Amino acid sequence: MSNPQVRPQAEEEPALIEAAREAANEVLEAATEVERYIEKGTPQFMRTSLALFSGGFATFALLYCIQPMMPVLSKAFSISAAESSLALSVATAMLALGLLVTGPISDAIGRKPVMVVSLLAAALFTLGSAVMPTWHGVLLMRALVGLSLSGLAAVAMTYLSEEIHPQHIGLSMGLYIGGNAIGGMSGRLISGVLVDFISWHAALAVLGGLALVAGLVFWRVLPESKHFRPAPLKPATLLNGYRLHFRDAGLPWLFLIGFLLMGSFVTLFNYIGYRLLAEPYHMSQAVVGVLSVVYLSGIYSSAWVGSLADKLGRRKVLWAVILLMLGGLLLTLFEPIPLMLAGLLLFTFGFFGAHSVASSWIGRRALRAKGQASSLYLFSYYVGSSLAGTLGGVFWHYYGWNGIGLFIGSLLVVAVLVSLHLARLPALPGNTLAQAAH
C-alpha cells in the first residue's frame, strides 16, 4: 500500500523543476538582452560609428554650408546681413518643428527608415536649391532641407541610447557629434573656398552630391535596431510624453542649455565672416572659408569630453566646458589674428564638448519616451539657432563685433548658471543610468 504523503511530493517535484527552469530561462534571457547591446571594440560598434559619423557629417554639411556664403548672397540678392542669415535660420526653424513630429514617427515605424529617408531627401533638396533663381526660391528649398534633416537629428541620439551598451554611450555620442563637427567644418570649408572660384549655385550642387554619397553609406552600413519596440502614434500619448518630460526636475533645464549653446555658436559663426571681410582684415572669401578648420578642435573635444563625462560625471564637466566657450569668446574681441583664432578654437572646443555632455545626459535622464526627450532637446537647440542667429544680426548692424560679444556672452553666462543648477540636482531614484550623470 502506497504512502499518501509521497504522491503529492512526487507530483510537486516536476512543477518545482519547471519553475526553476523558467526562472533560469528568464535569467538567461536577461543576460542575452544585455549582450545584445553593441559594445566598444566589436564590428557592430565600428559599423554604427561609421554610419552615424556619416549621417552627422551630411546633416551638418548640408545645414551649415550656406553660412560662409552669406556675404556672397547679400551681394547677389542685394539684401542685408540679417536677411541673408535667414538662409540658415529658416532651415534650422523647420528642422526644429520637424523634430516634434519625426521623433514620434520613428517611435512608431522604426529608427533606421526615418534616418535614411531624411538624409536622401535633404541631399536632393540641396541640389534643388542650387538651381533656384530667386531669393524666395532659395529660402523655400532651405526650409525643406531643414525639415528633411529633422528625421536624422531627432532619431540618431535615440538610436544610440537604445543600441549601445550604457557604459559606452558617452563615447558613441561623442563620435556622432564628431561627425557633426567634421560635416560642419567640411560644409563651410568646401562652400567657403568654392564660392571664391565658382558660383554659389555650383558650390551647393557639390555639397548636395557629397551628401548623397554619405546617405548611401549610412543606408548600407548602419545595423538594424535590436532594441526598438514600436509604439502606436497617438496624439494623447505624445502629449503625455511631453508633459512627463517638462515635469522632470532636470530635463527642461537641459533643453534650455541646448537653446543657449546653439544660439551662441551659430551667432558667432554667422557674423565672423562679415568681420573678417571688412577692415582691417580684408580677407578673401576663400581664406574665411579655410578658417572652418577650427572645427577640428570640436571633432576631438566631442569624443574626449564625452568619455571624460562617462568617468567623472556630467554634472562635473558641463559647466566647465561652457566656461571654455566664454573664454574663447573673450579672445575673439581682440584685434590680432592669432588671438582671434585661438578664441575660435577654444570656443568651438567648448561648444562641441558641452553639446556632447548635454545630449548624452538627455538619454540617461529620460526614463520613458526617450525619442520625444531627444526631440525636445534638439527642438530647443535649433530654435536657439534660428532666433539668436538672426537676432545677432541686429547687434552686428548697430554695435559691430563688440555687440556680438555682448549678446553671446549674455547667453553663455545664463548657460553656466543653468549648468551649475543641474549639478546640484539629485540623481533619479532607482535609475542606475542616472547614477552615471553624477
Image (cartoon, helix red, strand yellow):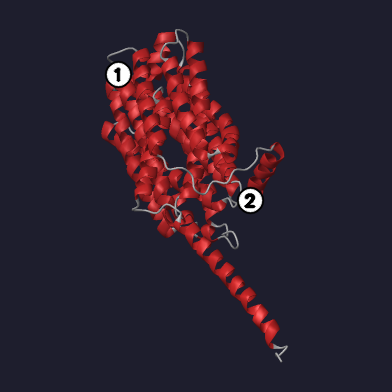
**Which quadrant of the rendered structure holds the N terminus?**
bottom right
Residue position marked by numbered label 1 in the rendering: 194
Residue 333 visible (yes or no)? no
Above/below status of 259 relative to 10 = above
Q: Which quadrant would residue 103 be assigned to in this image?
A: top right
Q: Which quadrant would residue 23 be assigned to in this image?
A: bottom right
The secondary element bearing badge 2 is classed as loop
Residue in the image at 41% along x and 34% along y: 219
Mark 1 near mark 2, Cβ–Cβ under 8 Å?
no
Above/below status of 196 relative to 221 = above
Q: Is residue 241 left or right of residue 172?
A: right
Seen from the viewer's position, the closer of residues 329 and 204 is 204
Mark 1 belongs to which amino acid?
Leu
Residue position marked by numbered label 2 in the rendering: 248
Q: Position of residue 381 (x, y in %)?
A: 52, 36
Q: Position of residue 186 (x, y in %)?
A: 33, 29
Mark 2 belongs to which amino acid?
Asp
Q: Position of residue 416 (x, y in %)?
A: 49, 47
Q: Mark on residue 136?
A: none
**Marks 1/2: CA–CA distance:** 47 Å
Residue in the image at 65% along x and 40% along y: 232
Q: Position of residue 341 (x, y in %)?
A: 30, 34
Residue in the image at 48% along x and 59% along y: 32
Above/below status of 24 relative to 85 = below
Q: Earlier in the sequence, mark 1 or mark 2?
A: 1
The secondary element bearing badge 1 is classed as helix
